[in-house]
Image (cartoon, grey):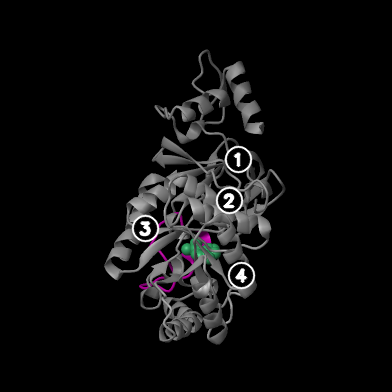
Amino acid sequence: MVAFIRMEYVLECNIMITRRGLLHFAAGTAVLSATELERRIGQKDFRGLTREELPTPCMILDQDLFEKNLKTMAQHNKASGLSLRAHVKIHKSTEISRRQLELGATGVCCATIAECELMASAGVKGILFTCQPSGKQKIMRVVQLAKKEPTFHCVTDDVIIAGQLDEAAGAAGAKLNVCVDVFAGLTRQGCQPGAKALELAQKVASSKNLRLAGLMAYSGDASHTKIFTERKKRSAADLAGMLETAEMCKKSGLPVAIKTGGSTGTYNIDSGSLTEIQAGSYIFMDTAYLKIGGQSSDKVYDDFKEALTVMTTVVSKTRPGVCSIDAGNKAMLRTTDSVKDRPEVQVQNQGAEYGLLVWKDGDRDYRVGDRVEIYPTNLDTSTNVYDRYYVARGEKIVDAWPIMGRAGAAHR
Ligand SMILES: Cc1ncc(COP(=O)(O)O)c(C=O)c1O
């Protein structure tokens, strides 16, 4: 709304703000009003649109780097035989899922039932809901989705929930694909591997309205373990229980077609243990992943490139070595974020609508009105507060993709 008023004001007064920070009153200024920008986006008319014209803060996706990331993962999947069930929670965009599927992904993972419903409504097949459905409302939505979309899967780590899913699926006339969620180092989820997990798998397999699809083991702590060899060890340790359970299932005659888990951090580690990888962040990358170290360097993990930035504007610059920007807590700014092309600049939170950029050295100063791009640390929560990705090639904006799966309430 703030951006809307400001843009309208710019149009009415015919003010142009030049790169030198001067205001120019000019007839027929080229600055777009917010209404006109929305109209152009609605009509996919991006002629002449550049980063400079966008209201800030906003998300900018570098198309070339993004496509390179998609291809790197797709090529790896082809070469390793490890399928990709890409996690949607990172991007929440049907446009992006469609591209991942076109490049060979077997499906997508979703963290909320709302994300699952959105993806299904866009025609996405092979959805896996990676959070166990609990409570009548979610269970009802899960079985309704299974009825509409037979390739939909969910997970369970609880024998009582398995019973409730079976009952609800029966009542809805649905057959529900279920993966047993086995503990893989993350306290938040997963039943104990071995006998307990086998018992649950048997319960699912013997339920009239459920189909045992396989096992899930999400080793979320392995994903960000620093140094490749350490990460490899951590992932192997975290997945051992799931592999033991898979063996036990096999011996009991239970099918384990899917062994799903893993992440951007372990995509080139888990091919011996998993049949599919649930990587999500690789499409944009975040500042945390860059520091975990890769196969060829303990310092940098650069298999995938940083393709997503939050573009902000400098709103005040009154003292040396510090300026404020129009992205603060509401824009999910974090002190671990980093500034594009200015590694020496620190990001600090100031308030709801303000952030601070602070630097000691460096030969470049910021001026009021400058655009500054920031790499986010946590993609899931950052993408959750923006309406769309502005897709850029260099300075030009070539498309805009709505972030349709962002939540109005925490989980919806
Ligand atoms: C269950 C599950 N699988 C996969 C992922 C994707 O991991 P990443 O974004 O690190 O690739 C996540 C991310 O939090 C997750 O929660």
Q: Residue at x 45, y 76 (%)?
A: 227
Q: Which residue is mark 1?
A: 314
- CA separation in Å, label 1 and label 4: 56 Å
Whichever of callouts 2 and 3 sits on the residue coming sooner in the sequence is 3
Residue at screen point 62% across, 48% down: 407
Pair 2/3: label in front:
2
Judge: label 1 CB < 8 Å from ligand 1.
no
Q: CA distance from mark 4 to mark 2?
A: 23 Å
Rendered position, 103 above or below 370: below
Amino acid type, label 2: Ala
* Type of the residue with mark 4: Gly
| Dot in front, 1 or 4 | 4
**Residue at the extreme left:** 79
The answer for how far apart the CA atoms under marks 3 and 4 are is 31 Å
For residue 319, what is the image quadrant?
Answer: top right
What residue is disc 4 on?
A: 163
What percent of the width, then of the height, locates residue 344?
54, 57
Within 10 Å of disc 4 (Cα), the crowding (few <14, some 14-19, many 20+) is some
120 versus 259 height, above or below: above
Name which residue type carries label 1: Val
Total numbered circles: 4
